[in-house]
Amino acid sequence: MSDVNKTIQKWHASFRKGTDFDSWGQLVEAIDEYQILARQLQKEVQSTNSSDFTEEQKKTLGKIATCLEMRSASLQCTQLKDEFKLEDLKKLESIIKNILTFNKEFPFDVQPVPLRKILAPGEEENLELEEEEDAAAGAGLTEAFPPRAPASQGTLLPRLPSEPGMTLLTIKIEKIGLKDAGQCIDPYMTISVKDVNGVDLNPAQDTPVATRKEDTYIHFSVDVEIQRHVEKLPKGAAIFFEFKHYKPKKKFTSTKCFAFMEMDEIKPGPIVIELYKKPTDFKRKKLQLLTKKPLYLHLLQTLHKDS
């Protein structure tokens, strides 16, 4: 398989991954995937060294990047007048898959994103350099999408029905310690349960946005109902807590750090767990502590057993 076909295959897989997350209601993951793919496509469009695609094909790739951004914006802000629907985005799957032979009219009246950086979540960029480049490349350009409106109510799920002899787990997220806690905008947690290979065992849940900050702590004081009986969690599974916040200059929500709790740590009472640097390592292979300071995620576990 040629390099260009491998690239297209990779784009198609990323597109499918994003729309799958979207259809499952895992909106944060869908947004991340859409923005990463949009940036990859935009890089190809802006590349002057690549002869893999014709100018017409690059224009189509640019339009797909625009649609990915539009869908991402629709998920981030529910009050957009012109919502870009998932079923519309799915119409582009065959185009991205067959970009080398696509010769029809693009199904939506959109334009490629102007020359500007599309930042994937979690990417570290020099903001000053970025602003200089933006000023040079497109002074006076208006922003294509409004700032993210945080889902302040969260997506927490109710407790599962009890079953005889089975145990349910409620985790109260009390607070997180961060040296720059007061600077975090619209902070919230995404909670997910993964197997040893990092595969989801349950739908991810988002807490409401935390509003109370005190010194080096952000207080959540919210209960999360784990959506699987403890006895049904496979060996090697873990519960992940990703701390996320909004970056107004970059206009996206970023993961700042994460923590996790393994199965042998499930026991009633308080627990304090360490924070690790992003990106979130769901396989727990390459972990780096966020800080040497005594700053942690504070949780309280309650077990419910139906006898």
Image (cartoon, rainbow, N blue to C red):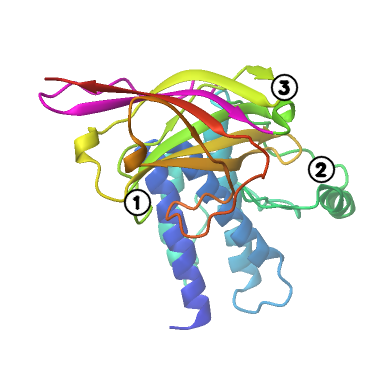
Image spot of residue 234 (x, y percent): 24, 47
Vertically, is 224 above or below 63? above
Lower position in the chain sequence, tag 3 or tag 2: 2
Q: Residue at x 31, y 38 (%)?
A: 202
Is disc 1 placed on a helix, strand or loop? loop
Residue 247 figure quarter: top right
Please state which of residues 209 and 14 is positioned toward the viewer in this rendering.
209
Crowdedness near tag 2: few (<14), some (14–19) or many (≥20) residues, C-alpha within 10 Å:
few
**Residue 141's mark?**
2
Crowdedness near tag 1: few (<14), some (14–19) or many (≥20) residues, C-alpha within 10 Å:
few
Is residue 144 located in the magenta-colored stretch of the structure? no
Crowdedness near tag 3: few (<14), some (14–19) or many (≥20) residues, C-alpha within 10 Å:
few
Q: Which residue was labeled with disc 3?
A: 215
Image spot of residue 112 (x, y percent): 66, 53
Q: Quadrant of the N terminus?
A: bottom left
Please state which of residues 280 and 266 is positioned toward the viewer in this rendering.
266
In the image, taking residue 4 as reference, residue 250 lies left or right, namely right
Is residue 156 located in the magenta-colored stretch of the structure? yes
Image spot of residue 195 (x, y percent): 32, 50
Q: Which residue was labeled with disc 1?
A: 199
Can the viewer see residue 109 in this picture?
A: no
Mark pair 3, 2: CA separation: 39 Å
Can the viewer see residue 116 in this picture?
A: yes
**Amino acid on which the number 2 mark rests in the picture:** Leu
Is disc 3 placed on a helix, strand or loop? loop
Mark pair 1, 3: CA separation: 36 Å
Give the dominant element type of the magenta stretch: helix, strand or loop: loop
Mark pair 1, 2: CA separation: 41 Å
